[in-house]
Image: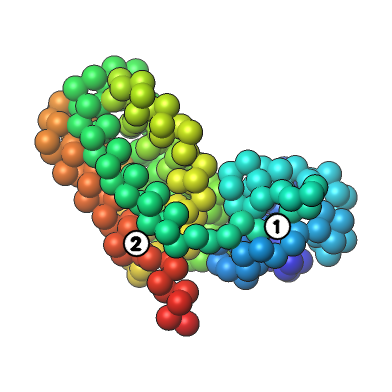
Amino acid sequence: MNPKKFEQIRRQNPFMPLNDIVHELLLQEIISFRLAPATRLSESGIAQELGISRSPVKAALEQLAERKFIHVKNSRYYVADFDEQEYKEICDFNMMVEPYATAKAAIHATPEQLDELYRLAYKLRDIYKEAYHSGPNYSYSRILETELDFHLGVVRASGNRLITQLYEERKYEIWHYRGFLLYSRPEGFFDTCDTDHVLICDMLKLGDDELATAVSRRHLHVSRDGIERYELLAKK
């Protein structure tokens, strides 16, 4: 663990709950591979290193376990493995589901759903602009949570209950690997993607399913093809 990094996040986010700060620190350590897959995470050890009680550490570990970044075995916490095959399958799943769902959302989205998607899209635009200027120390939790809300919102707006159910069942696997994608972003990634979500909303508002599909597919390609975390790691 990195106590200096912990204090830095704490200073930058004075009103953030302690468990969220620990969560952010651990998330950054995991998706940067500073905490290697299969590393055991000691609740008491982390608390001692950071000079805090065990309660916020436990809450952070449980949240990370729910979101598949760590797993629990015999009441012990371990960093989840990075599975290249699963990573590629999640990317394939996204490429099959999201463009189709976006096309359906262009036809079936309600005004209320569209308003909510625009709200999230503008929020993401602002977040990406902040991230672009903040560099590698930006809060990945904030990006990932808002990204998940937006993309899940598009899938729900499709009106297809089966696709929505399948996506919701896999949402934390998607969240998991999206973290590695964001950490390994190419130069200018945040500056390029900051308007993508608003553009998707514009296509939904127009009711143009073909353009909506094209924009969604292009957005996913930027994420997948521009930043292959596993391959970048293997080249080091």
- Which type of secondary structure does the marked residue at label 2 adopt? helix
- Give the spatial CA distance, label 2 vs label 1: 31 Å
Q: How is the image coloured?
A: rainbow
Nearer the observer, 1 or 199: 1
Q: Is residue 159 left or right of residue 235?
A: left
- Residue situated furthest bottom in the rendering: 236
Image coordinates for residue 21, horizontal then vertical, percent:
69, 51
- Which type of secondary structure does the marked residue at label 1 adopt? strand
**What is the quadrant of residue 187 in the picture?**
bottom left
Q: Is residue 55 above or below residue 137?
A: above
**What is the quadrant of residue 211 in the picture?**
top left
The structure residue drawn at horizontal position 29% and vertical position 39%, both measured from the top left corner, is: 98
The structure residue drawn at horizontal position 80% and vertical position 47%, both measured from the top left corner, is: 75
N-term-proximal mark, 2 vs 1: 1
Q: Is residue 58 above or below residue 6?
A: above
* Observer able to see residue 192: no
The structure residue drawn at horizontal position 58% and vertical position 60%, both measured from the top left corner, is: 81
Q: Amino acid at mark 1?
A: Tyr
Q: Is residue 218 left or right of residue 46?
A: left
**Any mark on residue 78, and which?**
1
Q: Residues within 10 Å of mark 1 (few under 14, many from 20)?
A: many
Image coordinates for residue 84, horizontal then vertical, percent:
44, 62
User: What residue would you read off at disc 2?
Assistant: 189
Image coordinates for residue 175, horizontal then vertical, percent:
49, 46
* Observer able to see residue 100: yes
Nearer the observer, 160 or 19: 160
Quadrant (top left/top right/bottom left/bottom right) for the N terminus? bottom right
Q: Amino acid at mark 2?
A: Phe
Q: Is residue 189 above or below residue 174?
A: below
Image coordinates for residue 26, horizontal then vertical, percent:
66, 57
The structure residue drawn at horizontal position 83% and vertical position 44%, both measured from the top left corner, is: 55
